Image (tube, rainbow, N blue to C red):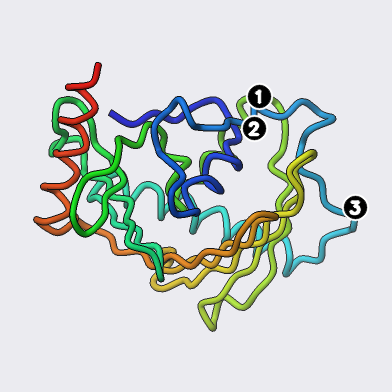
Amino acid sequence: MIRRWGLATIAVSACFLVAGCSPEPANVVAVPTQTPSQTPTAEATTPSESNVDLDKEFRKIVDASCDKASDVGVTETLVGQDRRLVWVPESEAYNDFTAAAVNDTEGIAPIWSSEVFAVCIDAINFSMLEEGGSTYAITVSGDLAAGTLHSEYTLENYGTFITDYVIVDGLIIGVTSETPASTTVKTIRYGMPSMRDIEHFREAIDEFLASE
């Protein structure tokens, strides 16, 4: 069970990037879908044809990456931290759950929303803001031929969020995220998580359900 909330949960993802930030919903700080005054803004410019093309390619990449993760599973490893975010396909759901935070020795807690994953936050922000009649005003630059992209966006009351992406075969395989609170590097592997991580994923779900 993993939801696509009607939220631009930038603060949620920032939370998960920091060691010790619990993935339990009681500790999630969610930012409601932006009203016009809250919408991430970028300096108004007249985009060149190349910028328009890059924006379109970025949208394709983030959508494809999120879809791939949902279809086949994904493991996002936080470099320098004993923490991974794992997501299994619906066909491999455990007690209706499909995602959890784990480490080398145990399951930590269920993950409730796909925005927590670096491969999905941009795709979800695009779709949710469009559904609300708004625009995800993210500024994108980089060199697709070299497999590198860079994005920046500003959210009122939260500051500027900077992300560098490594792209291979049209999919995100690495992310460096800089928030006002921290800088975090993630490596991304598509497909079923390791057997050890699946065991810890199930452990996290069992512990959560036992506490209810």
Residue 171 placement: quadrant? bottom left
Callout 2 touching callout 1 (CB < 8 Å): yes
Above or below, 80 against 22 in this view is: below
Distance, label 2 to label 3, CA atoms, is 19 Å
Would you name the residue on which mark 1 appears? 132
The disc placed on residue 129 is 2
Task: Point out the image quarter for the N terminus.
Answer: top left
Q: Earlier in the sequence, mark 3 or mark 1?
A: 3
Callout 2 touching callout 3 (CB < 8 Å): no
Distance, label 3 to label 1, CA atoms, is 21 Å
Q: Secondary structure at mark 1?
A: loop
Q: Amino acid at mark 3?
A: Ala
Asked if residue 125 lies left or right of residue 203, the reply is right
Residue at x 57% of width, y 36% of height = 9
Of residues 144 and 29, which is closer to you in this image?
29
Residue at x 52% of width, y 45% of height = 15
Asked if residue 189 lies left or right of residue 49, the reply is left
The disc placed on residue 44 is 3
Q: Is residue 122 visible?
A: no
Of residues 47 and 136, which is closer to you in this image?
136
Above or below, 109 against 13 in this view is: above
| Residue 148 x, y percent position in the rendering | 56, 76
| Residue 204 x, y percent position in the rendering | 21, 37
Q: Amino acid at mark 2?
A: Leu
Residue at x 72% of width, y 29% of height = 34
